[in-house]
Image (cartoon, rainbow, N blue to C red):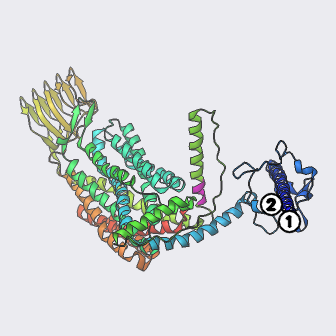
Amino acid sequence: MEDTYKDRTSLVKGAKDIAKEVKRQAVKKVNKAVDKAQDGYTQRSYNRFQDEEDDDDYYGQGGNYGIEANDDEGSSEATEGHDEDDEIYEGEYQGIPSTGQGKDDMVALGQSMRDEYKDRHELETERKADEEELAQQYELIIQECGHGRFQWSLFFVLGMALMADGVEVFVVGFVLPSAETDMCIPNSGSGWLGSIVYLGMMVGAFFWGGLADKVGRRQSLLICMSVNGFFAFLSSFVQGYGFFLFCRLFSGFGIGGAMPTVFSYFSEVLAREKRGEHLSWLCMFWMIGGIYASAMAWAIIPHYGWSFSMGSAYQFHSWRVFVIVCALPCVSSVVALTFMPESPRFLLEVGKHDEAWMILKQIHDTNMRARGQPEKVFTVTRIKTPKQIDELIEIESDTGTWYRRCFVRIRTELYGIWLTFMRCFNYPVKDNTIKLTAVWFTLSFGYYGLSVWFPDVIKHLQSDEYASRVKHFRNEEVSHFVFNFTLENQIHSNGEYINDRFIMMKFKSVTFEDSLFKNCVFEDVTSLNTYFRNCTFVNTTFYNTDLEQYKFVDSELINCTFFHIRTGCQISFDDDYSAYWIYFVNFLGTLAVLPGNIVSALLMDRIGRLTMLGGSMVLSGISCFFLWFGTSESMMIGMLCLYNGLTISAWNSLDVITVELYPTDRR
């Protein structure tokens, strides 16, 4: 019995000795691996590992690891200072872990190479393969989630953002005539107001589209819509023309990100068989935005009584109220977006698997509850995520100033956006980018050009008709007479006005040429498009009028007195039918888009995107050509409605094509 106990004790002691020896060798091996890894990173080459003096200690025959038991090396630096009974516990630092830690921490023959030792081309090839696998799996997941309440909720939220984009386009054309008069903008400078918004939209689409591929669709859309709402609201209060242009520039910069982000966002929660139809229905909100802008312009701008002033320096006319009202869809979209999740497709693209899975489960559960099937379980447990390629990012140290750190971060983000943009010109999407650029440019040039130009055309046609009805008065002599009524659309030449009083009256499109005013009084006079050319004023008094110096062209004023002159331009829509007509015409042009929207939504997935795009562009181009022969208002209006109705199908199909031709990281 005692011999059996001694044998058992010897066996246990021998097992402990063997375990300690194995631990010593493991520690020795790990520390040598650390030294080798540090040398390898310093020389930036993995070949360093094969040239060291003690390679034989690590590599055995056939490329496998070999361990030589050496009692002298058993107490190496790694175990120096430790008792033999010391143990290395789980979680204790044991050196730099490697991919093959379960296989002696080194790359063995036939094993896959670690990512650190692969070149970028190999990593991108692996990532591309992962993306193709993810695309197929994601399509099946979206089909399992179904189409229901979640997609329709997102549909209306993103529709508000697209509606704000449509409003922004029409605001410029509607405000332009009123703003020109209110701010005394010369004809040479009015073109800037029409183009500054589109300049901002161009830069904004580039910036926000690139940012959406880096920080997410929802985040980018929230920021860009907030920028648009803030500067649109601010532009309604500023007085100077330069500051007004500045606000509209940044307002356009913000809204420029709406269209590219909205369609990318919505397409990533739609199954392919429903994508064309529902993206076309989403385009209807752009039409609703145009109708909203037209209706608000018709209801607000012509009402001069809605305005107020604080002295002659601050004027707040009705068109500024219209600008505020047009910012409401943007504000509504920002509020609604705060309750929506990020695109799960984007989250998977950047490696955020758990967040994407939770959102997909939310989509599934929301739709199943709406269908009355709350017991149906989301069966997906694991989703493929593409290999993440680390990028070197320049970061300021903690000792740098805050503005320096902000500058570096902004510069890094802008550089990342630029790299994303340049990747659109890489194979295999390079040809698609060039072709789509040409299509987008030509379609935008025609549609947006007509949107800005058409109100001016209507105004020009009406002005010609108005000028044809002008009344001429020559060589009239009027003395001791009181003018207290409105003079409109008249030209007075070579007249003499002696001891006359012009009191509480309005001049609308009146011109005096080569006339004499002697001992006259102008009191409480309002003028619009009124000028005195080559006239002479003698002993004349001006009190509380808006007759500024620029209205006296080559005229001579002798011993004249001015009191309480109202500076700035005066707007009056009283009995002005032309303003109502312009807004009503644009309302009809926007409403003409409705049939095209319905047709494109129903036929998009049946006849194909390219067929609809080509057919629509050819037909709309033909209708636009006939605008050249328009000589009357009714003919121009008919051609505009026809053009808008035909071109909307091209817009819808182009939106769908662009979304589908680009991968998620460049969409």
155 lies left or right of 295? right
Is residue 461 visible in this depiction of the protein?
no
- Residue with the mark numbered 2: 104
Residue 248 x, y percent position in the rendering: 38, 45
What is the number of the mark on residue 501?
Answer: none
Q: Helix, strand or loop at disc 1?
A: loop
* Amino acid carrying mark 2 in the image: Asp
Question: Where 313 sits versus 420, above or below?
Answer: above
Write down the region rendered in magenta. 419-423
Majority SS type along the magenta span: helix
Residue 306, magenta (yes or no): no
Question: Where 163 sits versus 308, above or below?
Answer: below
Residue drawn at x 63%, y 42% is 395
Disc on the earlier residue, 2 or 1: 1
Residue drawn at x 47%, y 56% is 217
Is residue 25 visible in this depiction of the protein?
yes
Residue 407 x, y percent position in the rendering: 57, 39
Residue drawn at x 21%, y 55% is 581
